[in-house]
Amino acid sequence: RRRRAIRGHHGIAELRVLPGNVRYMKISHFDWVPDETGAVYDDAMRFLKDGDAWIIDLRGNGGGTSAAPHYLISHFLAAGTHDFTSLAGDAPPELSRALDHVPAGRLIGKPLYVLVDGGTGSAAEAVAYDLQQFKLAEIVGVKTAGAANNNKLVPIAPGFILSVSYGRPVHAVSKSNWEGVGVQQSAPCTPAQALDLAHAMALRKLSDAPGATPEARVETAWARVAVEARLHPVAVTPAQLQALAAHYGEPSVGFGEMTVAFHDGSLWLERPNRPTARLSPLTADGVFGIEGSDQLRARLTGKALELLWW
Protein backbone atom coordinates (compact mmCIF):
# COMPACT_ATOMS: atom_id res chain seq x y z
CA ARG A 1 0.00 0.00 0.00
CA ARG A 2 2.80 2.39 0.87
CA ARG A 3 4.52 1.79 -2.45
CA ARG A 4 1.33 2.56 -4.34
CA ALA A 5 0.95 5.85 -2.44
CA ILE A 6 4.58 6.87 -3.00
CA ARG A 7 4.43 6.05 -6.69
CA GLY A 8 1.26 8.04 -7.16
CA HIS A 9 2.80 11.02 -5.37
CA HIS A 10 5.95 10.90 -7.51
CA GLY A 11 4.12 10.67 -10.83
CA ILE A 12 4.30 6.93 -11.50
CA ALA A 13 0.61 6.17 -11.76
CA GLU A 14 0.53 2.53 -12.81
CA LEU A 15 2.69 -0.55 -13.35
CA ARG A 16 1.34 -3.60 -15.17
CA VAL A 17 2.42 -6.87 -16.74
CA LEU A 18 0.67 -7.20 -20.11
CA PRO A 19 0.25 -10.58 -21.87
CA GLY A 20 3.51 -11.72 -23.48
CA ASN A 21 5.50 -10.32 -20.51
CA VAL A 22 5.32 -6.79 -21.87
CA ARG A 23 5.90 -4.42 -18.95
CA TYR A 24 3.83 -1.21 -18.86
CA MET A 25 4.49 1.97 -16.86
CA LYS A 26 2.21 5.02 -16.79
CA ILE A 27 3.82 8.32 -15.70
CA SER A 28 1.20 11.03 -15.15
CA HIS A 29 3.66 13.86 -14.36
CA PHE A 30 7.31 14.40 -13.44
CA ASP A 31 8.04 15.29 -9.83
CA TRP A 32 11.32 15.06 -7.96
CA VAL A 33 11.70 14.97 -4.20
CA PRO A 34 15.36 14.60 -3.09
CA ASP A 35 16.19 11.27 -1.43
CA GLU A 36 12.71 9.89 -2.24
CA THR A 37 11.85 9.96 -5.93
CA GLY A 38 15.00 8.16 -7.05
CA ALA A 39 14.14 5.13 -4.90
CA VAL A 40 10.63 5.04 -6.39
CA TYR A 41 12.04 5.06 -9.91
CA ASP A 42 14.55 2.36 -8.93
CA ASP A 43 11.67 0.05 -7.96
CA ALA A 44 9.79 0.86 -11.16
CA MET A 45 12.81 0.27 -13.38
CA ARG A 46 13.52 -3.08 -11.72
CA PHE A 47 9.93 -4.01 -12.51
CA LEU A 48 10.38 -3.01 -16.16
CA LYS A 49 13.71 -4.77 -16.43
CA ASP A 50 12.12 -8.20 -15.96
CA GLY A 51 9.94 -7.70 -19.05
CA ASP A 52 10.66 -8.83 -22.60
CA ALA A 53 9.47 -5.47 -23.97
CA TRP A 54 8.60 -2.11 -22.41
CA ILE A 55 5.83 0.46 -22.82
CA ILE A 56 6.09 3.89 -21.18
CA ASP A 57 2.82 5.81 -21.25
CA LEU A 58 3.24 9.61 -21.31
CA ARG A 59 -0.24 10.46 -22.61
CA GLY A 60 -1.55 13.51 -20.76
CA ASN A 61 1.78 14.10 -19.03
CA GLY A 62 2.34 17.87 -19.20
CA GLY A 63 5.89 17.72 -17.85
CA GLY A 64 7.33 18.88 -14.54
CA THR A 65 10.79 19.09 -13.04
CA SER A 66 13.71 18.04 -15.25
CA ALA A 67 15.42 15.82 -12.66
CA ALA A 68 12.87 13.01 -13.00
CA PRO A 69 13.03 12.61 -16.81
CA HIS A 70 16.83 12.86 -16.66
CA TYR A 71 16.90 10.01 -14.14
CA LEU A 72 14.45 7.98 -16.24
CA ILE A 73 16.30 8.46 -19.53
CA SER A 74 19.64 7.54 -17.97
CA HIS A 75 18.42 3.94 -17.69
CA PHE A 76 18.19 3.63 -21.47
CA LEU A 77 21.47 5.35 -22.41
CA ALA A 78 25.06 4.30 -21.92
CA ALA A 79 26.74 6.03 -18.99
CA GLY A 80 27.94 9.52 -19.85
CA THR A 81 26.01 9.79 -23.12
CA HIS A 82 25.54 13.46 -24.05
CA ASP A 83 21.92 14.07 -25.05
CA PHE A 84 20.95 17.72 -24.49
CA THR A 85 22.70 21.08 -24.29
CA SER A 86 20.74 23.85 -22.53
CA LEU A 87 21.22 27.37 -23.91
CA ALA A 88 20.04 30.44 -22.01
CA GLY A 89 21.12 33.95 -22.98
CA ASP A 90 24.76 34.72 -22.24
CA ALA A 91 25.08 31.91 -19.71
CA PRO A 92 27.58 29.14 -20.51
CA PRO A 93 25.96 26.12 -22.21
CA GLU A 94 24.94 23.33 -19.82
CA LEU A 95 25.49 19.78 -21.04
CA SER A 96 23.20 16.96 -19.91
CA ARG A 97 24.69 13.47 -19.80
CA ALA A 98 23.31 10.09 -18.75
CA LEU A 99 24.12 9.28 -15.16
CA ASP A 100 27.14 7.07 -14.55
CA HIS A 101 25.29 4.89 -12.05
CA VAL A 102 21.67 3.80 -11.82
CA PRO A 103 20.92 1.29 -9.03
CA ALA A 104 18.46 -0.74 -11.14
CA GLY A 105 20.96 -1.13 -13.98
CA ARG A 106 20.55 -0.20 -17.66
CA LEU A 107 17.52 -1.20 -19.69
CA ILE A 108 19.05 -1.79 -23.10
CA GLY A 109 18.44 -4.15 -25.99
CA LYS A 110 14.71 -4.79 -25.75
CA PRO A 111 11.77 -3.29 -27.70
CA LEU A 112 10.63 0.04 -26.21
CA TYR A 113 7.47 1.99 -27.02
CA VAL A 114 6.47 5.46 -25.77
CA LEU A 115 2.81 6.51 -25.86
CA VAL A 116 2.10 10.22 -26.49
CA ASP A 117 -0.79 12.54 -27.31
CA GLY A 118 -1.55 16.25 -27.60
CA GLY A 119 -1.37 16.56 -23.82
CA THR A 120 2.22 15.31 -23.69
CA GLY A 121 4.36 18.41 -23.13
CA SER A 122 7.62 19.88 -21.95
CA ALA A 123 9.68 17.41 -19.88
CA ALA A 124 7.53 14.48 -21.06
CA GLU A 125 8.27 15.48 -24.66
CA ALA A 126 11.96 15.55 -23.80
CA VAL A 127 11.80 11.87 -22.86
CA ALA A 128 10.02 10.88 -26.07
CA TYR A 129 12.25 13.09 -28.24
CA ASP A 130 15.46 11.87 -26.64
CA LEU A 131 14.60 8.18 -27.04
CA GLN A 132 13.44 8.80 -30.60
CA GLN A 133 16.60 10.65 -31.63
CA PHE A 134 18.79 7.82 -30.36
CA LYS A 135 16.52 5.32 -32.19
CA LEU A 136 15.75 3.54 -28.93
CA ALA A 137 11.95 3.71 -29.04
CA GLU A 138 8.92 3.77 -31.28
CA ILE A 139 6.70 6.79 -30.58
CA VAL A 140 3.04 5.74 -30.69
CA GLY A 141 0.02 8.09 -30.80
CA VAL A 142 -0.40 11.63 -32.12
CA LYS A 143 1.84 14.69 -32.29
CA THR A 144 2.75 16.17 -28.90
CA ALA A 145 2.24 19.74 -27.63
CA GLY A 146 5.49 21.22 -29.01
CA ALA A 147 6.65 22.93 -25.80
CA ALA A 148 10.43 22.65 -25.78
CA ASN A 149 11.78 26.08 -24.81
CA ASN A 150 12.07 27.25 -21.22
CA ASN A 151 9.98 30.17 -20.03
CA LYS A 152 9.68 32.45 -17.03
CA LEU A 153 6.44 33.95 -15.73
CA VAL A 154 6.67 37.71 -15.13
CA PRO A 155 3.86 39.51 -13.23
CA ILE A 156 2.45 42.56 -15.04
CA ALA A 157 0.28 45.07 -13.10
CA PRO A 158 -2.55 45.16 -12.40
CA GLY A 159 -3.29 41.44 -12.83
CA PHE A 160 -1.53 39.85 -15.78
CA ILE A 161 1.30 37.35 -16.23
CA LEU A 162 3.71 37.44 -19.15
CA SER A 163 5.38 34.21 -20.26
CA VAL A 164 8.88 34.97 -21.55
CA SER A 165 11.02 32.42 -23.34
CA TYR A 166 14.59 32.55 -22.05
CA GLY A 167 16.30 29.28 -23.00
CA ARG A 168 16.12 26.20 -25.18
CA PRO A 169 17.39 22.63 -25.23
CA VAL A 170 19.43 21.43 -28.22
CA HIS A 171 19.68 17.70 -28.81
CA ALA A 172 23.07 16.20 -29.57
CA VAL A 173 21.73 14.21 -32.54
CA SER A 174 19.23 16.56 -34.23
CA LYS A 175 20.99 19.81 -33.25
CA SER A 176 17.46 21.11 -32.69
CA ASN A 177 14.38 20.43 -30.55
CA TRP A 178 10.60 19.98 -30.79
CA GLU A 179 9.48 23.58 -30.14
CA GLY A 180 6.31 24.38 -32.07
CA VAL A 181 6.35 21.12 -34.05
CA GLY A 182 5.99 18.48 -31.35
CA VAL A 183 7.50 15.02 -31.25
CA GLN A 184 6.45 13.21 -34.40
CA GLN A 185 5.01 9.74 -33.95
CA SER A 186 6.53 6.79 -35.81
CA ALA A 187 3.33 4.75 -35.35
CA PRO A 188 0.33 7.09 -35.74
CA CYS A 189 -3.01 6.20 -34.17
CA THR A 190 -5.65 7.74 -31.96
CA PRO A 191 -4.67 8.20 -28.30
CA ALA A 192 -7.29 5.63 -27.31
CA GLN A 193 -5.63 3.00 -29.54
CA ALA A 194 -2.04 3.77 -28.56
CA LEU A 195 -1.65 1.13 -25.86
CA ASP A 196 -3.15 -1.66 -27.96
CA LEU A 197 -1.07 -0.69 -30.99
CA ALA A 198 2.16 -0.57 -28.99
CA HIS A 199 1.29 -3.90 -27.36
CA ALA A 200 0.61 -5.46 -30.78
CA MET A 201 3.90 -4.10 -32.14
CA ALA A 202 5.78 -5.50 -29.15
CA LEU A 203 4.17 -8.92 -29.52
CA ARG A 204 5.01 -9.06 -33.23
CA LYS A 205 8.62 -8.10 -32.47
CA LEU A 206 8.92 -10.73 -29.76
CA SER A 207 7.31 -13.41 -31.91
CA ASP A 208 9.73 -12.71 -34.78
CA ALA A 209 12.83 -12.57 -32.57
CA PRO A 210 15.39 -15.21 -33.67
CA GLY A 211 15.93 -16.48 -30.13
CA ALA A 212 12.25 -16.78 -29.17
CA THR A 213 11.41 -20.15 -27.60
CA PRO A 214 8.43 -22.20 -28.79
CA GLU A 215 6.69 -21.46 -25.47
CA ALA A 216 7.23 -17.72 -25.93
CA ARG A 217 5.89 -17.86 -29.48
CA VAL A 218 2.74 -19.62 -28.26
CA GLU A 219 2.23 -17.00 -25.54
CA THR A 220 2.72 -14.04 -27.89
CA ALA A 221 0.48 -15.61 -30.56
CA TRP A 222 -2.30 -16.11 -28.00
CA ALA A 223 -1.98 -12.53 -26.75
CA ARG A 224 -1.88 -11.06 -30.27
CA VAL A 225 -5.31 -12.48 -31.13
CA ALA A 226 -7.02 -10.41 -28.42
CA VAL A 227 -5.00 -7.24 -29.07
CA GLU A 228 -5.55 -7.37 -32.84
CA ALA A 229 -9.29 -7.90 -32.25
CA ARG A 230 -9.44 -4.67 -30.26
CA LEU A 231 -7.56 -2.80 -32.97
CA HIS A 232 -9.52 -4.37 -35.83
CA PRO A 233 -12.90 -5.53 -34.47
CA VAL A 234 -14.43 -8.53 -36.21
CA ALA A 235 -17.73 -7.69 -37.90
CA VAL A 236 -20.39 -10.21 -36.92
CA THR A 237 -24.08 -9.52 -37.55
CA PRO A 238 -26.75 -10.20 -34.92
CA ALA A 239 -28.18 -12.90 -37.23
CA GLN A 240 -24.81 -14.67 -37.38
CA LEU A 241 -24.49 -14.54 -33.60
CA GLN A 242 -28.04 -15.78 -33.06
CA ALA A 243 -27.35 -18.78 -35.31
CA LEU A 244 -24.62 -19.92 -32.87
CA ALA A 245 -26.91 -19.90 -29.82
CA ALA A 246 -27.64 -23.46 -28.68
CA HIS A 247 -27.22 -26.06 -25.93
CA TYR A 248 -23.92 -27.96 -26.03
CA GLY A 249 -22.76 -31.11 -24.22
CA GLU A 250 -24.65 -33.30 -21.78
CA PRO A 251 -25.33 -32.74 -18.07
CA SER A 252 -23.40 -35.82 -16.88
CA VAL A 253 -20.53 -35.83 -19.39
CA GLY A 254 -17.24 -33.90 -19.21
CA PHE A 255 -17.81 -30.29 -18.19
CA GLY A 256 -21.57 -30.81 -18.30
CA GLU A 257 -24.15 -29.09 -20.42
CA MET A 258 -23.33 -25.56 -21.53
CA THR A 259 -25.61 -23.01 -23.11
CA VAL A 260 -24.75 -20.23 -25.50
CA ALA A 261 -27.58 -17.70 -25.34
CA PHE A 262 -28.20 -14.62 -27.47
CA HIS A 263 -29.58 -11.47 -25.89
CA ASP A 264 -28.76 -7.77 -25.68
CA GLY A 265 -26.98 -8.07 -29.03
CA SER A 266 -24.32 -10.48 -27.71
CA LEU A 267 -23.65 -14.13 -27.06
CA TRP A 268 -23.44 -15.31 -23.44
CA LEU A 269 -21.85 -18.51 -22.15
CA GLU A 270 -23.70 -20.27 -19.34
CA ARG A 271 -21.71 -23.03 -17.57
CA PRO A 272 -22.55 -25.13 -14.50
CA ASN A 273 -21.41 -23.48 -11.27
CA ARG A 274 -19.85 -20.56 -13.15
CA PRO A 275 -21.07 -16.99 -13.64
CA THR A 276 -22.58 -16.16 -17.02
CA ALA A 277 -19.96 -14.55 -19.25
CA ARG A 278 -20.26 -12.42 -22.38
CA LEU A 279 -18.54 -13.75 -25.52
CA SER A 280 -16.63 -11.23 -27.65
CA PRO A 281 -15.70 -12.05 -31.27
CA LEU A 282 -11.92 -12.36 -31.74
CA THR A 283 -11.51 -13.94 -35.18
CA ALA A 284 -13.56 -14.40 -38.33
CA ASP A 285 -13.52 -18.20 -37.91
CA GLY A 286 -15.58 -18.20 -34.73
CA VAL A 287 -13.14 -17.76 -31.85
CA PHE A 288 -14.60 -15.73 -28.97
CA GLY A 289 -13.06 -14.24 -25.88
CA ILE A 290 -14.73 -15.15 -22.59
CA GLU A 291 -15.34 -12.18 -20.33
CA GLY A 292 -13.32 -12.36 -17.13
CA SER A 293 -10.67 -14.80 -18.40
CA ASP A 294 -7.51 -14.16 -20.43
CA GLN A 295 -6.64 -17.86 -20.51
CA LEU A 296 -9.89 -19.38 -21.81
CA ARG A 297 -11.58 -18.90 -25.17
CA ALA A 298 -14.44 -20.51 -27.06
CA ARG A 299 -14.72 -21.57 -30.69
CA LEU A 300 -18.24 -21.89 -32.06
CA THR A 301 -18.59 -23.76 -35.35
CA GLY A 302 -22.40 -23.80 -35.50
CA LYS A 303 -22.38 -27.49 -34.58
CA ALA A 304 -19.97 -27.63 -31.69
CA LEU A 305 -18.54 -25.59 -28.84
CA GLU A 306 -14.80 -25.96 -28.24
CA LEU A 307 -13.08 -24.54 -25.15
CA LEU A 308 -9.53 -23.36 -25.87
CA TRP A 309 -7.08 -23.08 -22.98
CA TRP A 310 -3.72 -21.36 -22.88
Image: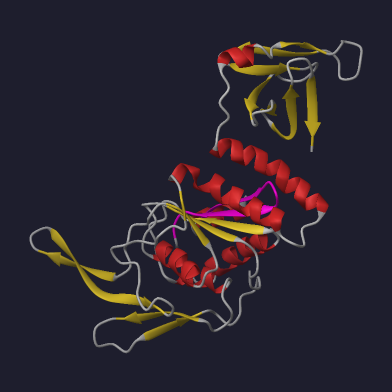
Considering depth in this image, is 9 or 97 the residue closer to the camera? 97
Q: Residue at x 61, y 55 (%)?
A: 3
Q: Nearer the viewer, residue 199 or 271?
A: 199
Q: Residue furthest right?
A: 253
Magenta segment range? 12-29
Q: Quadrant of residue 145?
A: bottom left
User: In this view, which residue lies farthest toward the front?
Assistant: 285
Identified at 71% across, 48% down, the residue is: 220
Drawn side of residue 296 relative to residue 89, left or right: right
Pick the quarter of the image with the C terminus. top right
Check if residue 18 falls in the magenta segment.
yes
Instruction: Say if residue 153 shows up in the picture.
Output: yes
x then y, percent, for residue 34: 49, 71
Q: Nearer the viewer, residue 253 or 238?
A: 238
Main SS, magenta region, reads: strand
Q: Where is residue 54 drawn, in percent x and y?
A: 61, 58
- Give the camera-side residue of 8 and 52: 52
Left or right: 1 as drawn, with respect to 253: left
Q: How is the image coloured?
A: secondary structure
Q: Tell me the residue at 41%/63% (across/down).
A: 125
Inspect this view and state whether residue 36 appears.
no
Q: Where is residue 113 drawn, in percent x and y?
A: 55, 58
Q: Is residue 183 left or right of residue 42?
A: left
Give residue 107's quadrant in the image: bottom right
* Residue 77 falls inside the magenta stretch: no
